Image: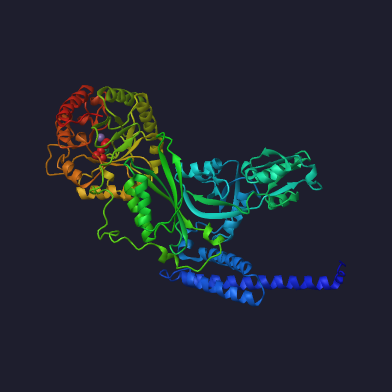
Amino acid sequence: MSKLPPDPPDAVASARREIDDADREILRVLGRRFAAVRRIAALKGAEPGRAFFDEGREREILERWAATARGLELPEPFVQDMLREILRHSKRVQEPLMPRERGNERRRTRPRVAIQGIAASNSALAVTRLFATRATRGAEPVFAETFAEAVEALQEGRVDYALLPVENSISGIILDVHRLICDGTLHAVDEEVLVLRHVLAARPGSSLERILTVRSHPAALAQCTRFLRNTGLRCEPWFDTAGAAESLASAPESTAAICSPEAAELHGLDVLARDLADHDSSETRFLLLSTRAETPDVRLPCRTTVFFRLNHHEGALARILQVFAEHGANLLRIESRPQVDHPWEYGFLVDLEGHGEEAHLAEALRRARRYCNHLRVVGTYPRRARPSESRPRIAGPPRAARRPAPQPEAPPRTPALLTDLAPDRKRTTVRVGSTSIGPDAFTLIAGPCAVETREQVLAAAAIVRRAGGAILRGGAYKPRTSPYSFQGLGVEGLRYLEEAGAAHGLPVVTEVVRIENIPDVLAHADMIQVGARNMQNFPLLKELGAVDRPILLKRGMSATLKELLLAAEYILSAGNQQVVLCERGIRTFETATRSTLDLSAIPVLRRRTHLPIIVDPSHAAGDRELVTPLAVAAAAAGADGLIVETHPEPERALCDRDQALTPAGLEEMVEAVGAVLAAQGRAWR
Ligand code: PEP
Ligand code: MN
């Protein structure tokens, strides 16, 4: 066959000029298209009720493009891919223009974003990609060696966000990050998906034949097994793909790196081979984490991540999944996480399609809480990983129509409360460290009103242990009626309390009076008390709903039982289902006692709620001689336990001196109550 004559050089040059012109034209036209997209976003943003994305119109555009493409002899799948890319970017360009997004902007300057890795690592590339369309239009990556260090930087306020990889489409979840998300309290505020491109890079002038060793991040090596097997190269794990590229400057000439093309370029390396991954597409999904929640506009297509721990009722997981299904909440992913404090129990991280404020999802989450000890919405954020879009899309009914019709009994007119004792609901057992409070036994919490000294609380713990108490109490932050009274030792007191509990094998409960104290209390206590004076401190209650620690909620001295239950509802509805109610006496016209113990609260609450109910006879009476008779009455009326004050030397107590039981008094009370319990067929825990 004869060769074709070569094109005259000026013909090639002229074709190239034409290509360059066409490219410029394409970019100009794209610029015009995105300007119009931004204009529309601003108009739609001003109309809160209006749908942001119109799937019907999207389908129309797709069909129009397909028809035009046929006339121009352009392959349809290619044109569709391009359009999909443009539409995806259009959505992202619009997001920061929505009113709610503007509210989320903390600062106009470039935020600092911690990542694991260095410049040109995949995490750094993900930062560039994500922030190109966020309101701040750019961010400054801050490099950390490990995921934990990136999170530490965030918690210490050295950065505004951390962007961490959560899963890869080939190798699955990234365990260290999964753990940080499940066990922490960080909020997920955005998502990015990066298509990984693995190349083999080596020092300039090198060739594939001369390479013997390849270094890279273990995850990258694991994604290129076929290439590594075929070439027989020796693998050397490195902390980061870009770090491996950087290290070649001082490595033997026979060493190469698997990294991104960007990292190869940054470090002046030659690319010896491309597309090394075992599968066509290796994608990594990253989450942008923050210490504060940011809620996107409810009209954006979103993903909602939720972490929950089940309560111990049979079939709780199945029922939660059923609740999701009944409410048309599409489950995208479920992962389990062992609970470090409770061996062989698990928490679950689930991703749901949709915005947490959409009615069907909000209702599903509300109902799911009934089967949990704790449920935390990790975040609602714009959804960028959309597997359905990588397949050719066939016109189907719009998203909303695919949702099952709402269940006829789904939204009751007065929504049931989470505190309600529904017919199918068992009474709740609240676990406190190694012990619990609930229907199967009678629990004694005892200890001094306030932690005064290390010695005092150690002695009190020994007394409580000897008397058979299950939990040690002691206040480190005291809500005193008079500002001149002893206010508590604060963190020092928390430390003594924790030490005393540990020394005598007792979990500890202590009061929190301000939101700012919660982290310290969490660091030292097994249970958190909300005192009578704070029962309706709603911001505090909401904050405690977000923590995963049992709460002892005391009845306000002039609160009705309905108000007490609604205060508990604040905690439950914010995620934390582990609440114990405490009747501690109310203000009446009677002055013979400090308060009046409302014994009827016990059977009334029992009828209305599944939550455990305990009684505090010490604060009700204000008089140590009345504590035992009231404690006996509380047990007789069906309480689940008691909280009483005791002091090694009551006459020297700095706080509530008159009501503190002596060590002998405590033992007498335990015996007297024990007789009632025995008569009821119950026993001390
Ligand atoms: C306490 O338990 O020490 C206390 C202050 O109780 P109350 O909030 O019931 O007064
Ligand atoms: Mn007290």
Task: Say which residue appears at 24% left-offset and 37% top-offset.
Answer: 439
In the rendered image, which quarter is residue 681 located in? Answer: top left
Residue 355 vertical placement versus 315 (above, below): below
Hey, which residue is sitting farthest front in the picture?
1
Task: Say which residue appears at 25% left-offset and 44% top-offset.
Answer: 610
Query: Who is closer to the viewer here, 227 or 187?
Result: 227
Answer left or right for 324 relative to 619: right
Ligand 1 falls in which quarter?
A: top left
The count of marks equals: 0
Residue 447 % position (x, y): 28, 29
Query: Who is closer to the viewer here, 100 or 173?
Result: 173
Residue 475 % position (x, y): 31, 34
Residue 143 % position (x, y): 61, 45
In the rendered image, which quarter is residue 582 located in? Answer: top left
In the rendered image, which quarter is residue 627 located in? Answer: top left
Residue 572 % position (x, y): 32, 48
* Quadrant of the snapshot with the N terminus: bottom right
Residue 595 in view of the camera: yes
Task: Say which residue appears at 20% left-offset and 47% top-offset.
Answer: 608
Residue 386 in view of the camera: no
Answer left or right for 159 relative to 418: right
Task: Say which residue appears at 59% left-offset and 76% top-offset.
Answer: 67
Residue 571 vertical placement versus 59 (above, below): above
* Quadrant of the snapshot with the C terminus: top left
Residue 333 vertical placement versus 400 (above, below): above
